[in-house]
Amino acid sequence: MATTLNRFLKQKCRSVYRNQHQVLFNLTRYENHESLPSRLPALRSTTRSFLDFYQFGNKKAIEDERARLNDEMNRGYFADMKEFKEHGGKIAAASKTLIPAVSAMKFPVLAVTSSNGKIMKLPVTSNSNEVNKESLDVPKVTLVCLSFRASSQDMISSWSKPFVESFGDRKDLQLFEVSFIDKWLLGLAPIKKLLLRVLRKPNNSENSVLQRQIVYSFGDHYHFRKQMKVLNLLTGYILLLDKSGRIRWQGFGTATPEEVAQLLSCTSLLLKDQ
């Protein structure tokens, strides 16, 4: 058992070393930094968990890590790509009506960072520290767009653009486009600060009251993905939240005209109910 464990640790160390150099190579390789984080190799982030693997005496931690590794291996990049080719990112049709509040899932608390370095937590609700510290009004409705890879950026825009065009004059809505950066090296303070300087900035219209906020979430997101039932990382996930942070509507992939109409209609209904 000890021999097998030592062999496993040596293999993981070599893997971490190679990944570090691969990430640094990619950082200097790309000239167009607009979608830099998403263009990095689509490998699952298991490095952080490996660093926590010293908890050999913790039986539950070992069992959780074993289950995690098995899950990540079964849902690899090629499985996502195969599935993506079959449905083009449309893993399911968008909701046609609002999800009842009593059965709606609460959006998990997610720490995000804006391009100016400001850190906040989503969702912004009446119990959120963001409201207390920044004196922000609690939005009646929040549209959250989740992007794990560069392939989903255009998908996100197919939802967010008509949303801003329709509700750009409303102060009681918020729009967040969240890009996930799961490479642990990019989350280190010096590199993270440098990375934020070259990341894309929101292009808000001067005539729009509703601000389109582009934010980034650094670190391991395995448990967040499990809670949200996110399987394919190549597609986009669109979520409409009420003022309590509950998910009342959801869409996937590229929006169709019918789905855009459903999103706008459900947003209007939710605004009236709030």
Image: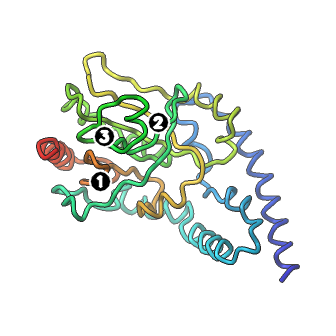
C-alpha distance separating marks 3 and 2: 18 Å
Q: Which residue is mark 1?
A: 246
Q: In the rendered image, is residue 263 in sight?
A: yes
Residue hosting label 3: 158
Report, in whole angstroms, how far the alpha carbon at label 2 lies from the one at label 1: 20 Å
Which quadrant: the C terminus? top left
Q: Which residue is mark 2?
A: 215
Residue at point 65% right, 70% down?
A: 65
Kind of element beneath mark 1: loop
Helix, strand or loop at label 2? It is strand
Alpha-carbon span between mark 3 and mark 1:
23 Å
Q: Amino acid at mark 3?
A: Ser
Few, some or many residues within 10 Å of mark 1 (<14, 14–19, 20+)? many
Q: Which circle's residue, 3 or 1, is located before the other in the chain? A: 3
x and y, in percent, of residue 156 in the image: 36, 42
Which mark lies nearer to you, 3 or 2? 2
